[in-house]
């Protein structure tokens, strides 16, 4: 793996600076490599390469190239999964199924979209064109999926890309550069520069040669990206944090709903932006729901991977130490049967006040808050009562009732009675969960400009 280089203009170019960052396997706490951090010189070179490659890429048979790339990712599926496990701790089975399986499904979704046809509105011809050079900035929790969710639609739309992956988990992005290169992506179409957010991410967001910045990460960093992008008035897409609610209506199958909520909340050790970290149950069912959640959570302990880094461990432990609710399962400290690694206990709190820190802030660890409500109006008010709005679930005896409540939730996605993920459905946030949508047609449109050409009568 080329941890000392950036992939620019189809070449691995040694990074000019000397600053390095150790990559640590979170299951052993041991450093296995160190990455040399790029700076603004690499950003400038990558943006120049992406600009130069634009015209030829717009004329290329992009679908065939991306089909080949898709096959190449599938072929090296085990390698991708292994690198992701080592970089950020996701257990091998989940790394294969979710960390690599989901981006493959997302890529299939984009490949299945037909060309965007021109439209006619009265005497105007409306055409869509690639926006140009895209700066993509991604986090460490799904290091391949978040990249593919941006890069696949951008490239298919005819854009060229400079990617800054998370410096904490850069390996999947570096392997992707290799795979794309072997699949025949022309030089300059896809560039990868590994560096820190405040240096490389900020430079990319502010760069006059970048037409759009697409960011996934924390709301705090998203704000900075937005500010950095403002002077050049580029398009900004933000996929940010969440504090999603699973709303269990009184007539729902309680055990089924609680079990599904626990497994959703703890997927990837709770390091998932869409995690249903708030379980809302009628107050008459609260104690039973808390008991069940504690039971399911404890049963998952051996299947959870570690948190991705020491920083993430410290952050989650800080929330656990300050928690002001009834502890049902888990709590502060390392999982009992582990003597090393950032293994956090799957934790459930009950009787959580909707306005408390536990119920308001994104913890990004395996921590579930059970919150009681009195009636459906109150459940909706609590569900909508955070600055976020990314995902959610509604459970009821019949789908119609659940749908009526789902319509009232201010959030980008809602799953009814455990309905499954759809890689073609728009994904993104209300409120401080972000701006714009990824996936499917909506995700594709983000990378297009719209031009109206008025035709004479
Ligand atoms: P983070 O915000 O710290 O970092 C995300 C990326 O932004 C990294 O590449 C980082 O280097 C970069 N960055 C940091 N500061 C920057 C700056 N000032 N300018 C430009 N780039 C900067 O987030 P993280 O800790 O890597 O990931 C966890 C967060 O991501 C969580 O809050 C989670 O909810 C969010 N997330 C959201 C989604 C979504 O689709 N909505 C998906 C996954 C993760």
Image (cartoon, rainbow, N blue to C red):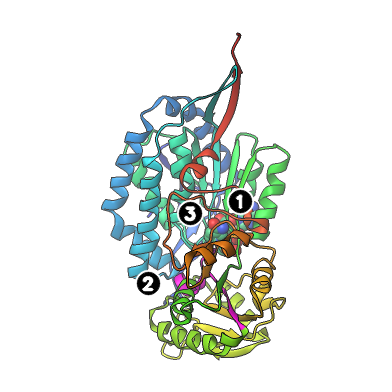
Q: CA distance from mark 2 to mark 3?
A: 18 Å
Q: Give the structural element (helix, strand or loop) at label 3.
A: helix
Residue 335, image x, y percentages: 47, 87
Depth check, front residue: 133 or 414: 414
| Local secondary structure at mark 1 | strand
Indicate the secondary structure of the residue bearing disc 2: loop
Give the Cα separation between the discs numbered 3 and 1: 12 Å
Count of numbered badges drawn on the protein: 3
Vertical relation: 180 (above or below) 380: above
Which residues fall within the magenta stretch?
A: 265-282
Q: Is residue 319 left or right of residue 182?
A: right
Rendered view: 102 above or below 63: below
Sooner in the amino-acid sequence: mark 2 or mark 1: 2
Q: Which residue is mark 3?
A: 146
**Which residue shows up at 66% across the image and 42% down it?**
206
Residue 255 in the figure: left or right of residue 40: left
Report which quarter residue 446 is drawn in. Answer: top right
Is ligand 1 less than 8 Å from the beta carbon at label 2? no
Q: Is residue 202 visible?
A: yes
Question: Residue 62, located in which quarter of the rendered image?
Answer: top left
Q: Position of residue 333 (x, y in %)?
A: 54, 87
Marking on residue 238: 1
Ligand 1: does it lie within 8 Å of the C-beta at label 1? yes
Circle number at residue 304: none
Counting from the top left corner in percent of width and height, residue 186 is at: 38, 33
Task: Say if disc 3 is inside 8 Å of ligand 1.
Answer: yes
Q: Which mark is residue 91?
A: 2
Labels 2 and 1 touching (C-beta < 8 A): no
Q: Earlier in the sequence, mark 2 or mark 3?
A: 2
Among all residues in the image, which is located at the extreme left? 75
């Amino acid at each position: 793996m080329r941890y000392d280089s950036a992939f620019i203009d189809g070449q691995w170019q040694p990074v000019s600076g000397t600053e390095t960052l150790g990559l640590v396997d979170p299951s052993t706490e041991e450093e296995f490599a160190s990455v040399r951090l790029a700076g603004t010189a690499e950003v400038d070179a990558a943006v120049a390469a992406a600009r130069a490659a634009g015209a030829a890429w717009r004329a290329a048979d992009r679908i065939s190239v991306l089909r080949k790339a898709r096959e190449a990712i599938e072929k090296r599926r085990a390698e991708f999964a292994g690198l992701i496990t080592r970089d950020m701790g996701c257990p091998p089975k989940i790394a294969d199924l979710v960390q690599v399986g989901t981006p493959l499904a997302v890529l299939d979704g984009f490949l299945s979209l037909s060309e965007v046809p021109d439209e006619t509105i009265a005497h105007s011809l409306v055409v869509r064109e690639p926006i140009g050079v895209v700066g993509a900035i991604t986090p460490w929790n799904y290091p391949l999926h978040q990249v593919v969710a941006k890069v696949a639609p951008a490239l298919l739309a005819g854009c060229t890309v400079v990617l800054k992956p998370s410096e904490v988990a850069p390996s999947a992005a570096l392997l992707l550069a290799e795979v794309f290169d072997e699949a025949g992506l022309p030089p300059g179409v896809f560039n990868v520069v590994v560096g820190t957010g405040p240096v490389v991410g900020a430079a990319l967001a502010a760069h006059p040669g970048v037409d759009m910045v697409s960011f996934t990460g924390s709301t705090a960093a998203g704000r900075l990206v937005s500010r950095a992008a403002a002077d050049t008035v580029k398009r900004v897409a933000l996929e940010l944090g969440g504090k999603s609610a699973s709303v269990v209506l009184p007539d729902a199958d309680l055990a089924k709903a609680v079990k599904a909520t626990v497994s959703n909340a703890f997927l990837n050790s709770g390091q998932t932006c869409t995690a249903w970290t708030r379980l809302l149950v009628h107050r008459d069912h609260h104690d039973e729901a808390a008991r069940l959640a504690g039971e399911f959570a404890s049963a998952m302990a051996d299947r959870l991977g570690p948190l991705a880094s020491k920083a993430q461990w410290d952050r989650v432990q800080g929330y656990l130490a300050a928690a002001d609710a009834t502890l049902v399962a888990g709590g502060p400290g390392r999982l009992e049967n582990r003597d090393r690694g950032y293994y956090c206990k799957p934790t459930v709190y009950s009787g959580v006040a909707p306005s408390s820190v536990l119920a308001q802030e994104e913890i990004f660890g395996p921590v579930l808050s059970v919150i009681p409500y009195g009636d459906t109006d109150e459940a909706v008010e609590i569900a909508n009562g955070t600055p976020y709005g990314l995902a959610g679930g509604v459970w009821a005896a019949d789908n119609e009732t659940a749908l009526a409540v789902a319509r009232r939730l201010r959030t980008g996605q809602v799953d009814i009675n455990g309905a499954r993920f759809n890689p073609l459905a728009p994904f993104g946030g209300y409120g401080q969960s972000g701006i714009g949508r990824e996936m499917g047609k909506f995700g594709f449109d983000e990378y297009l400009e719209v031009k109206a050409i008025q035709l004479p009568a």
